[in-house]
């Protein structure tokens, strides 16, 4: 996959922990100077003359910097390879989600038959049931970003009660929320929870390969969301910052009433309260979105 300069800069930005190029360059310069000074004084402590300690510390520092440069390039290549594979898996999972329900169930049925080839199942409740083993296999058709929640597990438990099943095998192109996993352990039925890894391994042969153009389109969309998320507006009004703004406003007001200093303190406190209101609104919006995604599953019948 050939990357453009913008895409390569995006991967470097993420691989280096979100640091900008000037900040990364400043870290390298300061780190090199500190290393050089440390090596010089270490060699002087070991008895080397001034000129020899200076030359040897410069050579050692250059060697260490060269090794770090080669390692960082290797690390960046591995990071790009892993991120490309992650994008490919994401597109494959989305392709599975967009399949008609009949085709998706056919792929999952093949996976279940491959996993349990001993007996012949019957189709019931949009799944398959192995009567001899009292095993029910079911495939959730969730979007990869909508995990399987408690409501879907409860709906499935009612089906298991009607079938009198003692074990259940589940698969989903998304994930399972922690509460749903804990709930399945409390039901007294042995659950086998299969996820994205097993589904991807089986479904790759049944789906068309993801071409380079689709990878670039997905990468461009991810870049747009990443830079929008890390913008100044999004960072200032983050959902988890309203308590910090209120605390800052409280101390500003207390400082003003105790020492009667500049009137800019209550103005700054008012701005902190305004930012806290925006941040609290973002927190409520995010909480409502999470509750809606769990209360309205795509497949809970």
Image (cartoon, rainbow, N blue to C red):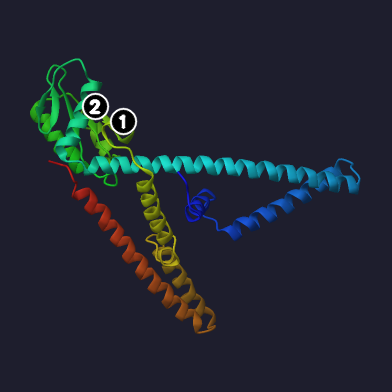
Answer left or right for 197 relative to 83.
left
Extreme-top residue of the structure: 118
Q: Position of residue 250 (x, y in %)?
A: 44, 71
Residue at 45%, 40% (x, y): give it: 82
- Label 2 Cα neighbours within 10 Å, binned few <14 / some 14-19 / many ≥20: some
Quadrant holding the N terminus: top left
> Is residue 149 among what the camera can see?
no
Q: Secondary structure at mark 2?
A: helix
Kindly identify the residue that appears in the image at 85 percent across and 48 percent down.
54
Eyeballing the image, is 221 above or below 80?
below
Q: Is residue 158 visible?
A: yes
Location of residue 286 with respect to 67 vertically, above or below: below
Q: 216 or 130: which is nearer to us?
A: 216
- The quarter of the displayed image where residue 247 is located: bottom left
The dot on residue 256 is none
Would you name the residue on which mark 1 appears? 198
Residue denoted by label 2: 111
Tell me how far mark 1 sits from mark 2, CA to CA. Answer: 9 Å
Q: Position of residue 48 (x, y in %)?
A: 89, 42
When the figure is inspected, residue 133 is found, relative to residue 27, above or below; the finding is: above
300 or 202, nearer to the observer: 202
Residue at (65, 43) in percent of width and height: 68
- Is the C-beta separation of discs 1 and 2 under 8 Å? yes
The residue closer to the viewer here, 117 or 260, is: 117
Specify whether 261 is left or right of 161: right
Q: Secondary structure at mark 1?
A: helix
Horizontal side, residue 154 vs residue 146: left or right: left
Q: Earlier in the sequence, mark 1 or mark 2?
A: 2
Q: Decide if residue 188 is on the left or right side of residue 54.
A: left
In-front residue for pair 221/3: 3
What percent of the width, then of the height, locates residue 183? 24, 36
């Amino acid at each position: 996959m050939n990357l453009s300069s913008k895409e390569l800069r995006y991967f470097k930005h993420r691989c280096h922990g979100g640091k900008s190029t000037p900040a990364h360059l400043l870290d390298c310069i300061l780190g090199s100077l500190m290393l050089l000074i440390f090596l010089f004084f270490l060699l002087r402590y070991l008895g080397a003359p001034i000129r020899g300690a200076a030359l040897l510390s410069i050579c050692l520092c250059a060697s260490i910097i060269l090794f770090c440069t080669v390692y960082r390039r290797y690390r960046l290549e591995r990071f790009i390879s892993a991120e490309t594979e992650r994008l490919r898996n994401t597109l494959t999972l989305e392709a599975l989600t967009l399949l008609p329900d009949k085709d998706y169930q056919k792929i999952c049925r093949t996976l279940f038959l491959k996993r349990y080839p001993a007996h012949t199942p019957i189709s019931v409740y949009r799944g398959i049931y192995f009567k001899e083993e009292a095993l029910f296999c079911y495939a959730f058709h969730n979007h990869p970003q909508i995990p399987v929640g408690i409501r879907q597990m409860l709906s499935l438990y009612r089906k298991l009660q009607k079938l009198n099943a003692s074990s259940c095998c589940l698969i989903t192109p998304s994930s399972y929320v922690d509460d749903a996993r804990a709930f399945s352990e409390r039901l007294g039925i042995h659950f086998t929870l299969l996820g994205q890894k097993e589904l991807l391994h089986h479904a790759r042969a049944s789906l068309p390969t993801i071409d380079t153009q689709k990878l670039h389109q997905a990468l461009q969309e991810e870049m747009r969301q990443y830079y929008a998320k890390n913008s100044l507006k999004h960072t200032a009004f983050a959902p988890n910052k309203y308590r910090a703004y209120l605390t800052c406003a409280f101390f500003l007001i207390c400082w003003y009433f105790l020492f009667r200093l500049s009137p800019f303190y209550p103005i700054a406190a008012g701005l902190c309260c305004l930012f806290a209101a925006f941040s609290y609104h973002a927190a409520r919006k995010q909480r409502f979105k999470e509750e809606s995604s769990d209360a309205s599953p795509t497949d809970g019948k």
